[in-house]
Amino acid sequence: MNYIKHEKVGYWFDILLAISLGGLACLTVYGFEKILELSEYFNPERISKFWIIALPSLSGLVVGLISYLLKIKSTEPIFDTVAGANFKRRILAKPSSLLKPVLAAISIIGGNPVGSEKSVIMLGSTVAALAGRYLDIPHKRRHLLIGCGAAAGFASAFMSPLAGILFVIEVILMDYSPYSFSMLALSSGSAFLFSKVIGLKPLFVLPALLAPKTIYLFIFALLGVACSLLTFLWEKLTLFIENNRERIKHHKIFAPMIGGFVAGIICVFVPIIWGPGLSNINFALGSVQPVLFSLLVVGAKIIGTSFALGLGVAGGDLAPSVFIGAFIGAAFAPIAPEYLPLFVVAGMCAQLSSAFHAPLTSILLAIEIAGGRIPNILPIVVATAISFLLSTKITPRSIFQEGLHRCNVPRKFGQLQNPLEIKIREIMLQNPLVIQKDEPVKQAIDLMREHNVTGLPVLDGEKLFGVITLTDLRRHVTSQDLEKPTSLFCSVDLVTISPATTISDSLTMMHENQVGRLLVVSPSNPKKLLGIVSKKDLLELATRRYAQIDE
């Protein structure tokens, strides 16, 4: 359908598709609302402890079976979508990706502590990606339409059109231009308008927010610190579980069931974390709760969500992030009970900011869900800014960026990462071929010939001793030396780097020292070998990445 590439036709088609994505997002949110109403029949207060455990487990099993039979990837399609948008990969999204929201609905009906909002965002972006794929829409327009789908999803889910625009700019596109802003506004605004027409209501009912005394800003700063630390723990736990998922036999089928089982057990003791839990934020807003209770809820939600998402239960982490932030904010409320709603809202925004590295989105979301009735926005700004600044230090990649990283999409604070700024830890050859210093030099020659390498690190037990290269062998070794120890011929004047060194600095060191490889050692122990990198590998990687960006 090449006619869509025509400039004038394409312009009006983009507008029509952006508005359509708004309507689609609105209908999806409406559908999830009905699903949540259905899930109320399985409220923990209405069912036995057996079913509190059984329902999440069974829903996880169903999700695992469907994913296995239909070969649906465990990664979220939005990661593949953004990867394709940025690097023109041939496969942006598959039609089976549209089933992800269905799987999320099954998980939510079963009470798993995951969210639906990210599924709405994902559906809009996936539909845009599929439209771009099948209608042969040019790359730049396709990229923007993916953002329009995500903006519409966010606006419908949170009834927050302006925050939806900023969410896409900060988290997904990481790009801004007047034209892209206008298209995002059109899609987000139409989604909000459609939501109003069909009667969707805001997720939260906020009472009036009081302006706190200036002295309390310190407390809100501590809240920001707490949120960034919680994000760090949550992300590390989820990644640890996800990285060990394959140890489970037939993990594609049974891992989601185990994740649901663990979540169900936790729900027996802390039933408030059942399902997405956004409706329970109104409970946190209603009255001041004991600090230990709020902390228990936060811990239970983090563990339950980590096991569920880490083991493959379908759903999102956006709603759990907001839920966790609300209750960590509530834990600070006993300090000044009259500011309870402000603490809850500040916690939600700070947690969202630290988890997704989206401070502007978080602040604007607070303004919109409060209907502009915030006499002093400064406490929310302080908590949000501190959580963002600290989280970028202790978790350099946000939850979303971590997903992109696993799809091999290098992103760095607002733009495609310069290939020369990639850290060596991401590309070094770990567990390289080595030789002990006491072994005969003949063994080094045989290893180089067998594995087609031109150099070997030389070890003294577990400690780095030197390096022997093909050049050393040619210059110094004769036929009478073949049985002599390698240590006599290797170089002990080593050029080493740490895993945090960039490709740019590594290439500079290679040039200055006239070497073709660098040994990667531990920063705390220069005798501990971690890996090796060669000039050839570095140049090939940088060339490939630059070629992808130029496309």
Image: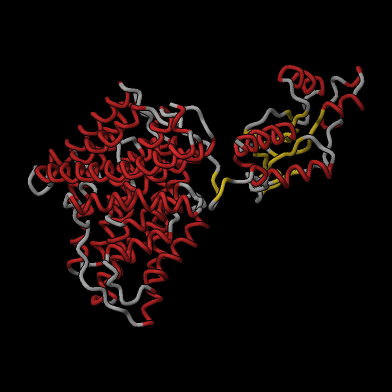
Residue lying furthest front in this view? 8
Q: Is 486 in front, or is 43?
A: 43
Residue at the outermost left position: 46
Judge whether residue 245 can be spotted in this image: no
Residue 394 in the figure: left or right of residue 267? right
Q: Quadrant of residue 546?
A: top right
Question: Residue sitting at 86 percent across and 28 percent down?
Answer: 471
Reply above or below: 382 against 444.
below
Q: Specify whether 452 is left or right of 143.
A: right
Examine the rendered structure and indicate whether residue 20 appears above or below residue 345. Answer: above
* Residue at screen point 69% across, 41% down: 520
Q: Answer with the quarter of the image where residue 262 lies.
A: top left
Residue 28 visible somewhere in the drawing = yes
Up the image or down, 355 lies above or below 521; here it is below
Residue placed at 71% from the left, 29% from the top? 434
Residue depicted at x 54% and y 36%? 87
Left or right of 318? Residue 480 is: right
- Judging depth in this view, the residue of 381 and 88 nearest the camera is 88
Quarter the C terminus occupies: top right
- The colour mode here is secondary structure
Q: Position of residue 352 (x, y in %)?
A: 37, 56
Q: Position of residue 210 (x, y in %)?
A: 27, 77
Q: 52 or 228, which lies in front?
A: 228
In the rendering, at what x and y percent does residue 183 appear? 41, 49
Image quarter of the N terminus: top left
How many badges with numbers are in the image?
Answer: 0
Residue 525: image location, x then y, percent: 67, 48
Occupied quadrant, residue 419: top right
